[in-house]
């Protein structure tokens, strides 16, 4: 395993976006580290406002920052709220990265997404595929903002010597996910739909698109572990992919979730909804070579996520 380069021990660590799925997983993971976790709520600091961010950072003086704050959503939300997805994400990352430079943050990790890669990039997608072709139109606004975040980290490293790094997670799921059927990602949406069908005794569940797109899924607690690993053991201008290496069609994901949930009905497809990019498997061999790999199998990961949904997010009377 790669040696430790940056210790979190005794450090003040700001998790920006601590209420989100990734941020809350980071808070759980950082509980095992000897560091002081710092957070700030939306009512106190609007991360899209530069003056508010810089004033708060100057006062809070974090030593390290996980930049997990972002406007995120599934395929429909991305395509519908184009301006929100590009504006909010550009502002949040520019404010925090510039603020980190101004206030002397020792280490910052920016989080992107596998949708930064070209729609038809060679699979699995290596880090070098960035900016080699046109983006998937349904999430180009979000992708452009996330590419800008990588470039901000590289620019501040080059001009100011800041130790700012970037990690690119694959599609995520797990505790704290968004279970709203309009704005959620596919794993959470299918969990809700299949759960409701089981409770109602329905015999079919709707799947958007053709069911043939391939996606790679990673449990968010595995991601949080990888992020702490990279924060402490990686320093460099290149972004690093974080995936599970396991890909599955949307149709097979539905069948896997049906087994986890105990639903024995069928599925039907709404071809009026977009498929998005046909395949999105990232090559995580750079991270693997450093000594990290995901711990959870898809079955164990989805069972955990479903248990969390039933305990925390399913409507009363549903279960
Ligand atoms: O997870 P998802 O919304 O995002 O959709 P992307 C993945 C695939 O699942 C698409 C299909 O082919 C959807 O059409 N799908 C089937 C569904 N049924 C459903 C459903 O009920 N809800 C949803 N949401 N999808 C996002 C990007 O792309 O991935 C973001 O838009 C980000 O920018 C995120 O990168 C990780 O994988 O297509």
Image: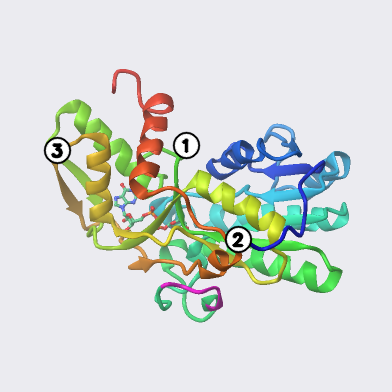
Mark number displayed over residue 300: none
**Residue nearest the observer in this picture, 36 or 32:** 32
**Residue nearest the observer in this picture, 51 or 29:** 29
Q: Residue at x 35, y 38 (%)?
A: 303
Q: How many marks?
A: 3
Q: Position of residue 108 (x, y in %)?
A: 74, 55
Q: Is residue 165 depicted above or below 192 in this figure?
A: below
Q: Position of residue 255 (x, y in %)?
A: 22, 48
SS at badge 2: strand
The answer to which of marks 2 and 1 sits earlier in the sequence is 2
Disc 1: which residue: 175
- Does the closest atom of ligand 1 sit within 8 Å of the Cβ of label 1? no
Q: What span is in magenta?
A: 124-128
Residue 113 can be seen in this image: yes
SS at badge 3: loop
In the rendered image, which quarter is residue 25 located in? Answer: top right
Q: Position of residue 103 (x, y in %)?
A: 87, 52
SS at badge 1: loop
> Do tag 3 and tag 2 residues touch (Cβ < 8 Å)?
no
Would you call the spot at circle 1 few (<14 residues within 10 Å), some (14-19), or many (20 or more)?
many
Q: Position of residue 85 (x, y in %)?
A: 54, 55
- Does the closest atom of ligand 1 sit within 8 Å of the Cβ of label 3? no
Disc 3: which residue: 264
Q: Is residue 155 magenta?
A: no
**Residue nearest the observer in this picture, 12 or 80:** 12
Cα–Cα span, label 3 and label 2: 38 Å
> Do tag 3 and tag 1 residues touch (Cβ < 8 Å)?
no
The C terminus appears in which quarter of the rendering?
Answer: top left
Disc 2: which residue: 167
């Amino acid at each position: 395993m790669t040696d430790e380069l940056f210790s979190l021990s005794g450090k003040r660590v700001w998790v920006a976006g601590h209420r989100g799925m990734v941020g809350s997983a980071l808070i759980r993971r950082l509980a095992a580290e000897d560091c002081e976790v710092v957070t700030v709520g939306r009512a106190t600091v609007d991360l899209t406002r530069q003056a508010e961010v810089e004033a708060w950072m100057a006062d809070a003086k974090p030593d390290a920052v996980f930049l997990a704050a972002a406007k995120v959503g599934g395929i429909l939300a991305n395509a519908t709220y184009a301006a929100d997805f590009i504006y909010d994400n550009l502002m949040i990352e520019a404010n925090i990265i510039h603020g980190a430079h101004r206030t002397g943050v020792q280490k910052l990790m920016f989080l992107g997404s596998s949708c930064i890669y070209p729609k038809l990039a060679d699979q699995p997608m290596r880090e070098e595929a960035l900016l080699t072709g046109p983006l998937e139109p349904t999430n180009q606004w979000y992708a452009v903002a996330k590419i800008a975040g990588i470039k901000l980290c590289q620019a501040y490293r080059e001009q100011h010597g800041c130790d700012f790094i970037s990690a690119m997670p694959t599609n995520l799921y797990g505790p704290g996910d968004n279970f709203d059927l309009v704005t959620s990602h596919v794993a959470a949406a299918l969990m809700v739909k299949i759960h409701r069908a089981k409770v109602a005794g329905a015999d079919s569940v709707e799947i958007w698109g053709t069911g043939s797109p391939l996606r790679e899924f990673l449990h968010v607690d595995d991601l949080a572990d990888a992020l702490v690993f990279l924060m402490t053991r990686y320093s460099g201008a290149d972004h690093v992919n974080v995936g599970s290496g396991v890909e599955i069609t949307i149709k097979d994901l539905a069948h896997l979730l049906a087994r986890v949930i105990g639903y024995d009905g069928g599925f039907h497809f709404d071809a009026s909804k977009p498929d998005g990019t046909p395949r999105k498997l990232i090559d995580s061999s750079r991270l693997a070579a450093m000594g990290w790999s995901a711990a959870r199998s898809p079955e164990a990961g989805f069972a955990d996520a479903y248990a969390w949904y039933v305990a925390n997010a399913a409507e009363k009377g549903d279960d």
